[in-house]
Image (cartoon, rainbow, N blue to C red):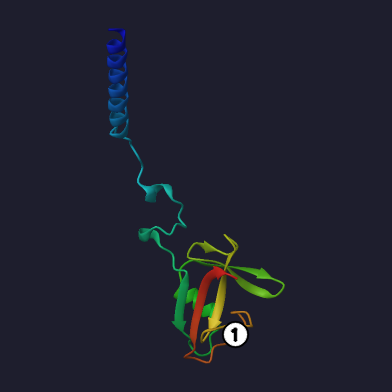
């Protein structure tokens, strides 16, 4: 008789735990949409920032001057080597080891973008990448 009571209590306790687990998983949790929690520099689809910027070079302009016309929110800083790109469209250099690199016709430039006076027609590309 005692054995039946123990088995019945064990069965009821198990069922109670199962029901409690189902209720716990089905509870309503209020959440804030992810896009509202992310910073402005997120790569969420509605706020995606370009990590590659390409354009055809205009003759007589420096690549840096044209970049400022082609991309949004270009932030530069001065150094002993000249002006350099610190951030484009919210992607800041130095974050996660990534920096903005400047390419001319597919080859990484060996001069600064502020020093390179374009001939016109070159394929200019800026890439946000690990170096």
Which quarter of the picture shows residue 28? top left
Image height check: is 34 above or below 102?
above
Q: Which quadrant: the C terminus?
A: bottom right
Apparent side of residue 92 relative to residue 9 in the rendered image (left or right): right
> Viewer-proximal residue, 26 or 57?
26
Q: Residue at x 47, y 91 (%)?
A: 121
Image height check: is 16 above or below 95?
above
Apparent side of residue 107 relative to residue 36 in the rendered image (left or right): right
Q: Residue at x 57, y 60 (%)?
A: 96
Location of residue 37 in the rendering, given as x and y in whole percent from the top left corner:
42, 47
Q: Residue at x 28, y 20 (%)?
A: 11
Which quarter of the picture shows residue 113? bottom right
Image height check: is 39 above or below 125?
above
Q: Residue at x 52, y 84 (%)?
A: 106
Location of residue 49 in the rendering, given as x and y in whole percent from the top left corner:
44, 64
> Viewer-proximal residue, 115 or 109?
109
Location of residue 116 in the rendering, given as x and y in whole percent from the top left corner:
59, 85
Location of residue 65 in the rendering, given as x and y in whole percent from the top left corner:
53, 78
The residue lying furthest to the top in this view is: 1
Image height check: is 33 above or below 93?
above
Q: Secondary structure at mark 1?
A: loop
Apparent side of residue 102 relative to residue 49 in the rendered image (left or right): right
Residue at which label 1 appears: 116
């Amino acid at each position: 008789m005692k054995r039946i009571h123990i088995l019945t209590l064990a069965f009821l306790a198990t069922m109670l735990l199962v029901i409690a687990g189902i209720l716990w998983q089905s509870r309503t949790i209020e959440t804030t949409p992810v896009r509202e929690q992310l910073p402005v520099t997120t790569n969420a689809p509605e706020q995606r920032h370009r990590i590659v910027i390409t354009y055809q070079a205009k003759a007589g302009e420096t690549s840096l001057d044209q970049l400022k016309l082609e991309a949004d929110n270009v932030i530069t800083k001065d150094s002993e080597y000249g002006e350099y790109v610190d951030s484009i469209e919210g992607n800041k250099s130095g974050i996660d080891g990534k920096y903005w690199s400047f390419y001319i016709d597919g080859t990484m430039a060996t001069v600064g973008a502020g020093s390179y006076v374009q001939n016109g027609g070159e394929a200019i590309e800026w890439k946000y990448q690990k170096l």
